[in-house]
């Protein structure tokens, strides 16, 4: 038999080498082949799980109790003493339009003139190309109003506190604030990295003790309070605060968001309310969204302080400038406030009337001084929501404040008065509130049954 030749023309030795190389290549490919990707766990929703659970609990409770959501209701037009919601007119008790200037033809004309001249937006940070004359005009007017050297206006009231507080103090410093300070103060304090120390609401003696302990250890101490507290309608003892802060070598900042146009005979705020020199306060903060008919915030103080913020505060330097129509509207509103102090007087009369009537009706108005804000404390979130729902159905718009925005025992309705309200409207609001409270108190609520249904809703 004739022997076979080499397979494919290859010798036995070459075939062996080829097979060895192929085997080696398969091993290398197997080693370098991508592994099966691991199975990732499901992505949890963004945000705080406890907040999500609380929101869902409130939604479930409202559905079970048959209460409509009282929040985010769209108003059809200008909200004054009355407002239209979905085509239905209601007596309005939830507006910051304290002096009735949002809707004033003179304010609208100023905004329209600025709109025609400068447009809707300045389209840039003021630091680069967003500066307009209307900005400095507003800041000059506000500085004069607060009797300070200068002022800086920003596009958001909340961001004003966050960026100013967060930028003025830092690690090694301390921020001492009233326990009921606004969220923007707390956010600014956290951003700063300074030690944050709350003191009991309006307790000047406790503040004094805190400063005595902190001042030797901290480089700088900033004390922050509000001029008019929007949850309770009360005010701090500003003269005592100024004395304590100065004696302890600290800095004092007062948030006048709800004070300007409200406190004092002419609406100049908490310093006028107490008849003291505003120079005792180092930093005045305010907003344009209440009596000044706009949106935004400002810091008024020394020229050095304002210039420092103007050139370096992130919330100002890296943010677009205030829209010209907003600035112009605020300038006009400030001018009308100055020329027509009767608006402030009428606001005070209306708020005092509401406070007297509410107390006479046996409603718990807490510590309100009756300047513009009067709470009716009901002690239960469910009770507050049910009373607000009854009032809305009867033509009165009054918002509930529920846990966790306030402690459960402090759940309430908040009533915001305006110079536009008439005495008859105020008496109607109080009478209907007292009637609704009495009706809700007569209702038998099975708390255990409600809790069980809420538990079942969460599990479902």
Image (cartoon, rainbow, N blue to C red):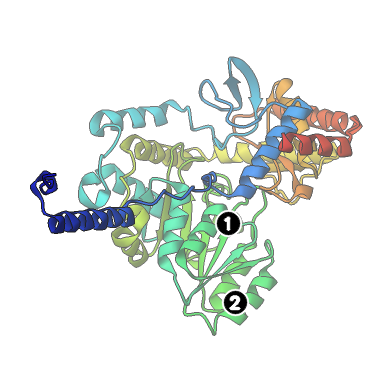
Image quadrant of residue 429? Answer: top right
Residue carrying label 1: 226
Indicate the secondary structure of the residue bearing disc 2.
helix
Q: How far apart are marks 1 and 2 (CA)?
A: 18 Å
What residue is rendered at 44% in x and 62% in y? 166
Residue 91 got which mark? none
Indicate the secondary structure of the residue bearing disc 1.
strand
- Crowding at label 2, few (<14), some or many (≥20) Cα neighbours within 10 Å? many
Residue carrying label 2: 211
Q: Which residue is at the front of the view, 253 or 387? A: 387
Residue lying at the far left of the rendered structure: 9
What residue is rendered at 60% in x and 66% in y? 239
- Give the number of callouts: 2
Residue 450 percent location from the top left of the image: 83, 35
Instruction: Give the left or right position of residue 304, taking residue 217 as reference.
Output: left
The tag earlier along the polypeptide, 1 or 2, is 2
């Amino acid at each position: 038999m004739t022997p076979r030749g080499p397979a494919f023309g290859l010798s036995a030795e070459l075939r062996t080498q080829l097979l060895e190389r192929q085997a080696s290549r398969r091993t290398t490919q197997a080693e370098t082949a991508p592994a099966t990707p691991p199975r990732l766990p499901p992505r949890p929703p963004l945000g705080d799980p406890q907040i999500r659970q609380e929101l869902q609990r409130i939604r479930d409770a409202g559905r079970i109790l048959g209460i409509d959501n009282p929040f985010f209701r769209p108003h059809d037009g200008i909200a004054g003493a009355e407002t239209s919601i979905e085509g239905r007119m209601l007596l309005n008790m939830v507006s910051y339009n304290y002096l009735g200037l949002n809707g004033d033809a003179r304010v609208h004309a100023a905004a329209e003139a600025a709109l025609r001249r400068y447009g809707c937006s300045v389209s840039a940070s003021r630091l680069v190309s967003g500066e307009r004359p209307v900005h400095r005009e507003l800041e000059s007017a506000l500085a004069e109003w607060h009797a300070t050297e200068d002022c800086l206006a920003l596009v958001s009231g909340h961001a004003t506190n966050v960026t100013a507080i967060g930028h003025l103090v830092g690690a090694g410093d301390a921020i001492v604030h009233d326990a009921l300070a606004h969220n923007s103060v707390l956010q600014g304090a956290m951003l700063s990295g300074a030690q944050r120390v709350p003191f009991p609401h309006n307790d000047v003696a406790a503040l004094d003790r805190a400063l005595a302990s902190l001042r030797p250890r901290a480089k700088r101490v900033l004390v922050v309070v509000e001029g008019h507290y929007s949850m309770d309608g009360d005010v701090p003892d500003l003269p005592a605060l100024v004395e304590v802060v100065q004696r302890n070598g600290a800095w004092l900042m007062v948030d006048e968001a709800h004070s300007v146009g409200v406190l004092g005979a002419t609406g100049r705020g908490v310093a006028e309310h107490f008849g003291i020199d505003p120079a005792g306060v180092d930093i005045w903060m305010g907003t344009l969204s209440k009596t000044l008919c706009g949106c935004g915030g400002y810091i008024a103080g020394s020229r050095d302080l304002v210039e420092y913020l103007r050139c370096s505060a992130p919330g100002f330097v890296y943010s677009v400038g205030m829209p010209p129509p907003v600035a112009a509207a605020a300038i006009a509103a400030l001018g009308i406030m100055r020329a027509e102090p009767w608006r402030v007087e009428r606001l005070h009369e209306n708020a005092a009337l509401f406070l007297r009537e509410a107390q006479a009706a046996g409603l718990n108005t807490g510590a309100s001084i009756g300047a513009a804000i009067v709470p009716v404390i009901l002690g239960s979130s469910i009770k507050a929501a049910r009373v607000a729902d009854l009032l809305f159905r009867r033509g009165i718009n009054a918002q509930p404040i529920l846990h966790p925005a306030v402690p459960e025992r402090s759940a309430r309705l908040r009533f915001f008065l305006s110079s536009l309200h008439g005495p008859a409207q105020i008496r109607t609001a109080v009478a209907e509130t007292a009637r609704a409270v009495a009706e809700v108190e007569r209702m038998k609520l099975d708390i255990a049954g409600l809790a069980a249904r809420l538990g079942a809703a969460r599990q479902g």
